[in-house]
Amino acid sequence: MSKKDPFSFGTLARRLAPSRLSGLQRTLLLFVVLPLLLLTALGIRFGLEQASQFQQQRLKNDLELIGRAISIPIGTALGENDRQAIELALGSVFVLGEVYGASVFDVNGVRLASAGVTESDLTRTRIPDLIVATGEAQQGFSQVGGRHLFSHFMPLFDVGGNIQGLIQITRRASDFGRALDQLTIIAWAAWGVLGLTIICAVMLGHYGGVGRHVDKLLEHMQRVAQGDHSHRAALEGPAEVAALAEGLNHMLDSIEQARREVDEHRAAETALLAQLKDNEKMAAIGGMARGVAHELGAPLSVIDGRARRLQRSSDPDSPQQREFSAIRAQVARLTSTVKQLLDYSRPAAATLRKTDPVQLSNSALDAITPEFEQAGKQLQRHYQPAAPALFGDPARLELALLNLLRNALQAARSRVEVSLSNNEQQLIIRISDDGPGLPDNDVTQLLEPFFTTKVPGEGTGLGLAIVQNIVEEHGGALLLANRPEGGCCASLLLPIHKEADA
């Protein structure tokens, strides 16, 4: 048997050790092996009793046959009063080697002749009277000369059929037990060997048929208890053990499913809490934006209008022109900041419709082209032929594209590329630049409102946050990554328009 085979005699020997017996093994020993051993012991005892009775009866029958064989010549010799013939007939019984003694008595129990060890006088016993009264043989055990003997008494009949005496034939009582003692030793030795065989067979059968599979099942359960929740028990062994393993696997699957559902609920709860925080944040920003728009909108318009009138009334070459331009630029920056706050806090659009991505991209690019020309940077377009339609709000999507294009314009050294592509489910709009790439900050941190890596005065930190909100409104995703050749790539993944949804 190979070393890898767990069903080995060494393992069985350890299993048979008392300290290693399992509950099932003890149950088998108590309710299977022990009753078998008791039944076999009772059977052996009953068999020995039957053998003893058979042996005793056989020996008694032997003595009766001997007595019948010599009764005729002794009876004839007794009728003729021939003592020599009687003694000769008595001596013939020793030829068989099974007789210990033989005697002839008259009807009163007086011994007439003897050979070997027999009773010397029967006058004080009831045997002569019983034989005369019944005419049948008598037998029994007795002590003669310190020896324990078995005696068989037979009546002697004359020619007329009358009892004229009796014959006693004896043999040692130990003859009845000698053969049986040997048989008893052999029987109980065989019972012991049979008992050991039954124990080994039951234990071997238990371990080979059930025990090793139960041990494997316990090992599987131990692995699960140690934290390996993905482990499953092998469906092997008897049908009952395999059913237990299947039930264990089903229970583990149920627990795993419940754990996944709990994790999903926790994730959903976390997402809802995050959404609630974002909503609270947007509500606060919206309230602040409305307050800022209310408090700053009219003054900024007045300042810009008066600066424009003063700029028109002054000499074009005068130093005041630069001051007025600076004032108007700062007013425009403040107006843009207020507008971004309003864009970020604006509720999500409720109407989504079929939108041409090429027209959407061209509209955004046309709006920002003057800024690229003023900065002296290239704006390249790469559109996939027959791009599928989007499902969204064109105004909100154009705002998202403009924010990404302005970020790319500020980060690019010389060129920005816009490309359109798609897969089976989404349309992908990529905006790439050849700038220094993303900073070392976490991407999620870059999407937080009011977080910016630009120098103070050049950004509000709302551009990417606005894009993220718009993309989430459309069920898409915003991906930010560095390009291998340098620069940053911002990808908008938007759902493709479907007629059924429309």
Image: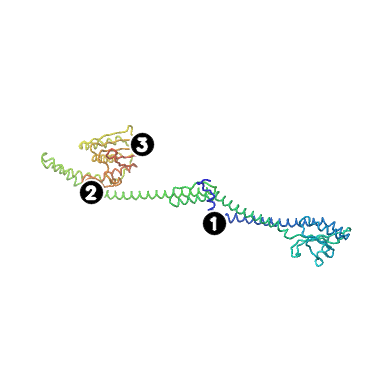
Answer few, some or many: residues within 10 Å of disc 1's Cα (few below 14, many 20 plus, some between 14 and 19).
few
Residue 50 visible in the shown view = no
> In the shown orientation, is residue 183 left or right of residue 438?
right
Choose top left, top right, bottom left or bottom right for residue 141: bottom right
- Position of residue 264 measured from the top left corner of the image (x, y, whole percent): 39, 48
Answer few, some or many: residues within 10 Å of disc 2's Cα (few below 14, many 20 plus, some between 14 and 19).
some
Distance Cα–Cα, label 2 vs label 3:
43 Å
Which amino acid type corresponds to the residue marked 2 in the rendered image? Val
Which residue is under mark 2?
292
- Residue 18 numbered mark, or none: 1
Which amino acid type corresponds to the residue marked 1 in the rendered image? Pro
> In the shown orientation, is residue 261 left or right of residue 199?
left
Between 136 and 424, the one nearer to me in the picture? 136
Distance Cα–Cα, label 2 vs label 1:
87 Å
Distance Cα–Cα, label 3 vs label 1:
69 Å
Q: Secondary structure at mark 1?
A: helix
Of circles 2 and 3, the one toward us is 3
Between 51 and 428, the one nearer to me in the picture? 51
Sequence-wise first label, 2 or 3:
2
Which amino acid type corresponds to the residue marked 3 in the rendered image? Asn
Q: Are marks 2 and 1 in contact (CB under 8 Å)?
A: no
Report the residue at 44% width, 52% height from top: 226
- Position of residue 74 measured from the top left corner of the image (x, y, whole percent): 84, 58
Which residue is under mark 3?
423
Between 169 and 360, the one nearer to me in the picture? 169
- Position of residue 399 measured from the top left corner of the image (x, y, whole percent): 27, 41
Sequence-wise first label, 2 or 1:
1
Answer few, some or many: residues within 10 Å of disc 3's Cα (few below 14, many 20 plus, some between 14 and 19).
few
Q: Is residue 258 above or below residue 103?
A: above
